Every structure is written in C-alpha cells, then in structure tokens.
Image (cartoon, rainbow, N blue to C red):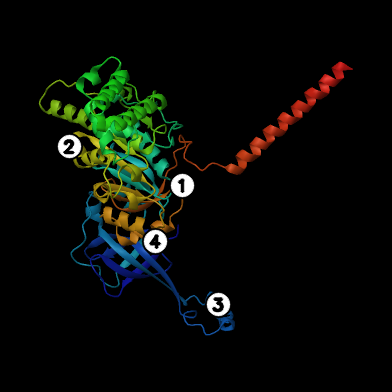
Amino acid sequence: MSQKTGHVIGDTKSTTVEAITSEPFSVGEYVTIESKQGAMLGMVEESTVHSMLLSDVPTFSDAAKLVELSHTNTRDKKFTSRISVVGAMDIIGRGRSEIPATPPVPGDVVTSAGAGDLGPVFAPEHGSWARIGTLLRNGDIPVKINLDKVASRHVGILAMTGMGKSNTVALLTREIVARNGTVVIFDYHDDYTTLGIKRTNILDAKVNPRTLGPDEFADMLDFRANADKQRGILERALTSNVRKDGDFWTALVEAIREIGETERNNKAASLRVIEKVNTAKRRLGGMLDPEISDPMSLIKVGHANILSTSEFGERQANAALSYYMREILDDRKDATVSRRHGKASRSRFATPVFVVIEEAHAFVPKGHDTGAKYWASRIAREGRKFGVGLCIVSQRPRGIDIDILSQMGSFAAMRMIQADDQRQVEAAAESAGQALVGQLSTLNVGEAVITGQWTGLDAIVKVDEVREKAAGADQSAVSEWASDLKKRRTGIERSGDMIQKDLLLKK
C-alpha cells in the first residue's frame, strides 16, 4: 500500500480538520497528524476528488476534449479529506481516547497510519481480547474485541438479512467457548443447528409448565393478549395443588372444568380454555413437559448451547425465552450473592453466562410489552452486576425497544439502507458518529462498523468468516431444482431398465 501524504488546510477544530492530499484517502482509513503537541490519530470521514478542468463543462463535445487534457495534466486533480481527530497517539496507546485541547494547525503533515501506529490500538496482546477481523481500509491490521466487555456490557448485532449477523454471533460464540465460557443462543429459525464449533450442545427449549407463571403459561397456550376471561380462569386453576399433582394435565383440566360448572357465566370460556390446553398438550407434548424436573439442567456449562424454539409460535417462543432468561438471571444472582458472603451455592452456573436473542425485534419489540422483553430489560440493567451478558440480534433495529437497545454497550452494525434503521442505530450507539453510521448503506457482506466499549477505537472492519458455521446462507433454489430433476430422470431411467429386463426374462 502506497504511503499517502497531505497537509492540514483551512480552519481547524479540535475534533475535525480538512486536509489536501497527494492521493485520495478512503473513508474509514486511519491517518496520523504530525502536530507540535505530538502525533495525533485521525479517521477519514469524507474524501473528495475535484477536477478544475471538469468542474464547469459547457457541452458534451467540450467534455471529450477536456477529459483527455485532464488525464495528462497532473495538476488538475485536487484531493481533499475531512478527518475526525480521534486523539493523541501517546494517550490512545495507553487505552484511552481524549480529544486534544488545541487543534492541529494548517500545514501540519498528514500520513497514512501504519501497523506500528494501529497495531497496539486495535490488537492488544491480552487474554481477554479476541480477534474479530481486520480493518477494512488497512487490511494488514487485525482488530480485536474485549470479551470482558462483551460478557458484562452487552452487544447489539444489527444488519439487513444476509449481511453477516449470524457469522458474527458464531465468531463471538467460538471465542467465548474457547475460554470455557457458557453461551445460550435462542435460535428461532434453526440458524445454528449446524454450528460446528467444539463443545456445541443443541437442544429443544423444553419448559416445565408447572414452573410457569400464569401469563407465561397463557402465552404457551397461545391465548390472545386481550383474552382476559380465559387468562383469569387459567390463573385461578393453576393452584399449588394442581402444580404438584402427579398427573398435571388431568388435574389442570379438572380444575378448569370445575370453574365452568360452578360459575355459569364462565362455562363457555372454561370450555375454550380446556380446548387450548388439550391442543397444546397434543402439539407441544415434547416441549411442554411437566415431567422434566429441571429444563435448565440441560444447558451445559462451558458450551455453546443452541436452544431451538422453532417448534413454538411467536407467542410461545416469547414465553420460553421469558422462562429461561428469568432462570438464568436468578441463578447468577444466587451464585454471585453466595460467593460475596462466602456461602455454598446450589446455582447451576458458577461463572458468567452470555445470552443471545435472535430475531430480537419479535421478542423485545417497540410499542408493546412481552415477558421476554421484561426479562431482557432486567438483564440489560442488572446483568453487569451478576455476570449475565446479553446480545441483541436483528435485521430490523427500528422495531426494537430503544431503552433496551441503548443499554447495549457495544455494537456491530452492518449494511442497512433503511433511514429509520440507521437513525435507531445512531440513537442507541452514542459513540458512533454520524459519519460512521452514514457508511452503513455502503458496506458489503461481512463488513461492519464496530463501536462501543468492546473496541479500542471505532472502526470499519472486515469480520473474519467462521468456517465452522454452515447454516445461515440463502438456499439456492436453482441448484435444488436441478438436483431434483436429475434424481427424477435417474429414477425414470432405472424404471425403464427394469421394464426392459422383465420383458427379456419373459421371452
């Protein structure tokens, strides 16, 4: 890569300068500014190429002549860049970023930042830092993220469909599990069932109905949110005796029937509740299991636990997420408090747990409350104290509750073209400047704006591909059609051969 140089020109600020350069700099590229105060690091926010010959062309025929002249005139092009001042190099090298009190002055030299400048900033040599990729504009510079911040300060992974969200989740999961960490991924569309990293535990999100609250159970039975009468009957029927009964389903149905028989105005509603119970028992018998003693015991410590909720409808999956998040947070609270007081703990998870919510716009939505949203909010607020990290993953940031999204301490934002989505990211990710957010519509697959507490500095990154992850890509309809046609033709040919063989034998 050629060494680009330039000079600061025009009016300067502590936060932003303009430079005229020998070649055009790339947006997102890092540069050094040699100032009397010492070297400063900057990032290119905007790059402009201006041609004096082609700036005001009267006609097309004139343009043809001027283009040729412009190509041969080395003085015709003017390259300028708007540069955001990140901070003094010596302070950044110590892990902090401070805007200088005095701005650079016109004439200060600007050069491309090299590995010696950027390596210590983006790739600290420390066990809690894990590689996530390379700088997009400085491809020889690795970028690492701080897993301690991931596990305590939460992460948002946001992008359009197919831009690399699940690959980034897989990368984080691989790095955490490699350090004996526990990850729980709520997999609504079976995107991770083929995740091939070591120590992967794939299981259905089983729930014991005896342990569910009335609202969670009503959601599992797929009651409408406004079905107040049916929800009330179910809540009254879920007595402690019913929860303890050896034949839970029969005891529950009998309790509901008794309410209908003793309260005439509730008879029709009771019958509908019984119908819902029987439907759920028949359809979700394997997932809604009153005989499973502790569904949480199926989660393995030090593993990537893929909890499939694909058999559930959205409302049922919401109830399952609510149950698991509540249990994980309560368990980690017990472990933390017991350790602080030197007491023995019966907690399942002695070490921090990282929870990933895929399709987060469905489970922590803007505009209405859900059980999963309540517990995600609790984890977002309290998880730092008790060792529960949260990862929000979505292709529709505009549909996520902003209070929860803004509590994510770090973000990987990939390509998104909807202005509403970009504004939501800008509002939630305070450290991401407008210039960085403005780059979201230009990113390619696997490229991301990395911002927040998990990185030394905000950056545009090419995220490493996780080869162990086979799922998540678009299906090739054309390939599948061709394969199916080949199989059918082969079948027809074999049938024809068998018919010919039978005729020969008969002769």
Q: Residue reaching furthest right?
A: 507
Kindly tell me whether residue 349 is visible in this rendering: no
Q: Which residue is mark 3?
A: 67
Q: Residue reaching furthest bottom?
A: 58
Q: Residue reaching furthest top?
A: 246
User: Do callouts 4 and 3 mark residues in contact (Cβ within 8 Å)?
Assistant: no
Mark sitting earlier along the chain (4/3): 4
Give amino acid for label 2: Lys
User: Which type of secondary structure does the marked residue at label 1 adopt?
Assistant: loop
Q: Which residue is mark 4?
A: 27
Q: Which residue is mark 2?
A: 385
User: Do callouts 2 and 1 mark residues in contact (Cβ within 8 Å)?
Assistant: no
Q: Which mark identifies residue 162?
A: 1
Residue 453 as seen in the image, left or right of residue 52: left
Q: Residues within 10 Å of mark 3 (few under 14, many from 20)?
A: some
Residue found at x 20% / y 21% = 240
Q: Is residue 364 above or below residue 78?
A: above
